[in-house]
Amino acid sequence: MSGFLALVGRDLRLAWRRPGDAALVLAFFLLAASLFPLGVGPEAQLLARIGPGVLWVAALFAGMLSLDRLFADDFADGSLELLALGAAPLELVALAKCVAHWLTTGLPLAILSPALALLFNLDGPSAAVLTLALALGTPSLSLLGGLGAALTLGARRGGALLALLVLPLMVPVLIFGVGAVEALAAGEGVATHMALLGAFLLVALATTPWAMAAALRQALE
Amino acid sequence: MPSMHALANPARFLRFSARVLPWCAGLTAVLLVVGLYLALVQTPPDYQQKETVRIMFVHVPSAWWSMAGYGLLAVLGASLLVWRHPLAALMARAAAPVGAGYAFVCLATGSLWGRPMWGTWWVWDARLTSMLLLFFLFLGHIALSRAFDEPERGDKAAAILGLVGALNLPIIKFSVDWWNTLHQPASVVKLGGPAIHPTILVPLLVMAAAMLMLFVTLVLLRTETEIGRRRLEAAAMAGG
């Protein structure tokens, strides 16, 4: 456990020393979301209708940006090999990387989303549900994305390939995440959607570390 | 019939495949001729859908076998990772584009069928959308297996992706069903017997058998090609 926390701390310190990377992701999220009103027109009704979906898709794409470097830097300078030889199992190492990725991308995106919800004319409760859904859904995105990053380690054309692999797998998170906000608008409870997001996260937590470790071992062979 | 583990040896597989392939190809041809005759000539036009109902005889089997094809990729991936069968990797390489082709045929025929039935080329209906996502999963598998300089690395990465994809596929299907259902409910496999008339069911099953045999034939043939290609590469490396 202490090794796990040390790894998360190390990645957070690395991210802290290069704050431009995380800021870039947030800037992309903001920019991508604000292009939509320019594309579809400024009617408040329409924006409130498509807002949750647009923000979720923008969050999905923004999360993709920093993924291809998740393992690549450590792979290039050899520290991944040292981590694989170390006391902590590779599954835990991979999980720690994903936790750090979420803390530097998914969580800031969720925190920023109420401000963007204002741009899309969402009311207070909808914005709150959207923020909660993002906070609960983005960890799954980091785990699936980490799997994609591990699988494409050392591949040609890594970035575009990563998106092709991972985005179809992320569809359930997108559907349940947007569904939570729409259920609120339809007057239904949001508990079902949140429970499904949570269930997906648990399944991802239980499976992806093993798959990531297997993929990393192949890359290190 | 040799066991799965015996066939993991490429030389033994080639001998087995050389014996089986002509029969598979012949059976495919016979079943296709019979099935297409039944489907295009023998079956009466539907009283609502007229002649367009005949698209179903290609559309539905291609949907079935593309889904089964992804299952095959998962099984092959597991046998590569667990038993390190060298042949499983080559067969997965051979099967993925065939499965993607079937998924594409399903989407294309669905679109052609949708035009007269729904009045539009594309509807974001639950089953069409799941099939589109399955098509993307196939594309990802194909792209990943060919993305590395060492083919073995691509094989293993694609094997892991196939397993994760097969695990996620039911969840994707469930979420898309949840998201939208506009299609008619499933009518062949359901409790209390099929809900469609034998004049349509028999040609459908014959066409399903024909397209299965076509799938098997193509995969065997492409696996032979992959074995040949690997041997050529190995020979070129050895010869410098």
Image (spheres, rainbow, N blue to C red):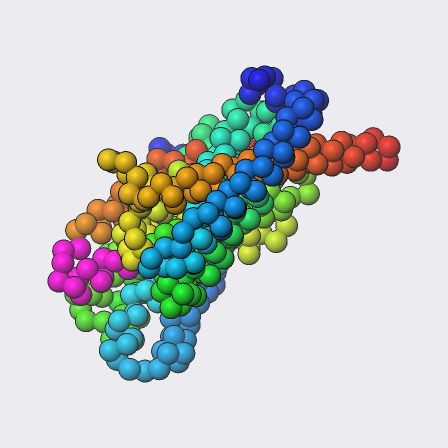
Q: Which residues are magenta?
A: A177-190
* Image point (69%, 22%), residue name: B15
Compared across the picture, whether A170 is left or right of B69 comes to: left
Compared across the picture, whether A51 is left or right of B158 comes to: left
Would you identify the image quadrant in which residue B179 lies? Answer: bottom left
Question: Secondary structure of the magenta portion, mostly?
Answer: helix
| Residue A8 place in picture, x, y as percent | 40, 43
* Image point (60%, 39%), residue name: B29
Q: Is residue A152 at least partly visible in the picture?
A: no
Q: Is residue A133 at least partly visible in the picture?
A: yes
A78, A119: nearer the viewer = A119
Looking at this rendering, what residue extends furthest in the right direction?
Answer: B239
* Image point (58%, 48%), residue name: B143
Looking at this rendering, what residue extends furthest in the bottom direction?
Answer: A42
Q: Quadrant of the N terminus of chain A?
A: top left
Q: Quadrant of the C terminus of chain A?
A: top right
| Residue A96 place in picture, x, y as percent | 41, 41
Above or below for A90 versus A193? above
| Residue B78 place in picture, x, y as percent | 50, 29
* Image point (31%, 55%), residue name: B183
Residue A188 drawn in magenta = yes
Compared across the picture, whether A3 is left or right of A187 comes to: right
B17, B46: nearer the viewer = B46
B22, B63: nearer the viewer = B22
| Residue B49 place in picture, x, y as percent | 36, 59
Compared across the picture, whether B240 is left or right of B160 comes to: right
Would you identify the image quadrant in which residue A62 lies? Answer: bottom left
Count of picture labels: 0
Residue A137 drawn in magenta = no
